Image: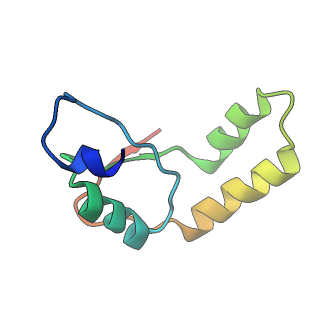
Amino acid sequence: MLGDLSRPGSHRAAWLIVSEPSARKRAWWREKLKPIEVIVLAVPEAVCRERAAMDSGRDMAATAAAIGQWWAAYRPGRGERVIEG
């Protein structure tokens, strides 16, 4: 199904959401799917934790660790549009 997104078809648009901090791995997705654009939502670490805390069933220790690991590994990629906020 994902491969179909890289070829002309009846779909007008599709969004693929990948939580990937590695610019190299995002480039792999870009190469495979050939999207019009890659958008990175660079939500600050503190905001991510605040939003996650709204989910009462979430293990916040594990979530905070995952958020910290994502930001520690994040690297911007060439040709990506970064939206901060």
Q: Quadrant of residue 16?
A: top left
Q: Nearer the viewer, residue 43 or 18?
A: 18
Please tell me whether residue 23 is drawn above or below residue 11 in the rendered image.
below
Residue 78 lies, with reference to residue 55, above or below; the image says below
How are the residues colored? rainbow
Image point 53% across, 52% down: which residue?
19
- Name the spot of residue 12 as percent of width and height, x first: 19, 27
Query: Quick check: 16 left or right of 11?
Result: right
Q: Is residue 34 left or right of residue 76?
A: left
**Residue 80 figure quarter:** bottom left
State the count of labels.
Answer: 0
Residue at 22% from the left image edge and 30% from the top image edge? 11
User: Where does the image place residue 65, in percent across and percent down from the top left?
Assistant: 77, 58
**Closer to the camera, 60 or 19?**
19
Residue at the bottom extreme, as displayed: 24
Q: Is residue 26 left or right of residue 32?
A: right
Please determine whether, in this image, residue 74 is positioned above or below residue 45: below
Up/down of 22 relative to 36, above or below: below
Locate residue 5, reporting x and y percent: 26, 44
**Quarter that holds the N terminus:** top left
66 horizontally vs 31: left or right? right
Give the camera-side residue of 60 and 14: 14
